[in-house]
Image: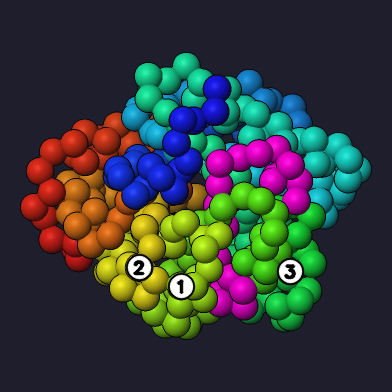
Amino acid sequence: MAPARTLAEALAADVLVLDGGLSNQLEAQGCDLRDELWSARLLVDGPEQIAAAHTAYVRAGARVLITAGYQAGFEAFARRGIGRAETARLIGRGVELARAAGEGAAEQVWVAGSVGPYGATLADGSEYRGRYGLTVAELERFHRPRIEALAAAAPDVLALETVPDTDEAEALLRAAEGCGVPVWLSYTIAGERTRAGQGLAEAFALAAGNDQVIAVGVNCCEPEDAGRAVEIAAGATGKPVVVYPNSGEEWDARARSWHGSGSFDPGRMRGWPAAGARLLGGCCRVGPDRIAALAAALRGPTSEPADG
């Protein structure tokens, strides 16, 4: 059943809980994600696992689910011998799985179609650097087919997420123009800059006058950087802010493993709505237990400062 309110209407009235990292939950369920398609591989040969992961987040209190399409580009599937028509069907399957997981919830659940950056489909970590050597027009041509396939599956919003620089943000916004689905724009950052080094006020300003953009924010970043980013995003655009940081652990790309202790603190995040955050969740290594803690924290007092 479709939600009675649009996500934009909901964000104008409420603070909503977003889900957490899909890949870590799939691994917790026993899935092997050592593949360049990452979690998107399970759209092909394990959709029931994706459905179970979405359901875990709904039970934890998530009101918005992000689809398993972060690395689901046409080129990436083509390297596996999967044609364009079948790829479009698989991208649509991601929306269907998330939609089905939310239908039995006591409250409305919205579906965000994941549109990851160009670097994600390369599976080499380049989304954390940006500046791929491609023009804005080339990036727009890359992203448009996936956006069209997702839009055809009718998610409630497109999550233009983990965007490392303003060139790719511009390309994504151009590619989404006219698709008939609202979007949010979320950068991956280091400190108060994009991964490519642009200031966040400049980066968010790209979306300031764009009515298709219903939220702006950050994801896949250190929790310590997210609070200040909320303030900058709200100040630069006047739009609702979406924020879903990582656990705070460090990824060792060479060893392909996580190290350190997490710093994801739902108590600290309680204060972020006062600065403009309307959609809060987690990214890498943030599982259903932490989303449940976040949902509980957001129901409590909101006296903590937004920075932190």
- Residue drawn at x 71%, y 78% is 136
The residue where tag 1 is placed is: 208
Q: Earlier in the sequence, mark 2 or mark 3?
A: 3
In the rendered image, residue 149 lying in the magenta stretch gets the answer yes
Give the Cα separation between the discs numbered 2 and 3.
26 Å
Q: In this rendered view, identify the residue nearer to me: 210 or 231.
A: 210
The circle drawn on residue 140 is: 3
The residue where tag 2 is placed is: 238
Give the Cα separation between the discs numbered 1 and 3.
20 Å
Mark nearer the viewer, 2 or 3 = 2
Residue 272 in sight here: yes
Q: Is residue 75 left or right of residue 304?
A: right
Stretch in magenta: 148-170
SS class, disc 2: loop
- Residue drawn at x 13%, y 61% is 305
SS class, disc 3: helix
Q: Is residue 64 left or right of residue 296?
A: right
Residue 148 percent location from the top left of the image: 75, 51
Query: Image height check: is 133 above or below 253?
Result: below
Residue 43 in sight here: no
Q: Earlier in the sequence, mark 1 or mark 3?
A: 3
Q: Give the crowd class for mark 2: few <14, some 14-19, many >=20 residues within 10 Å.
A: some
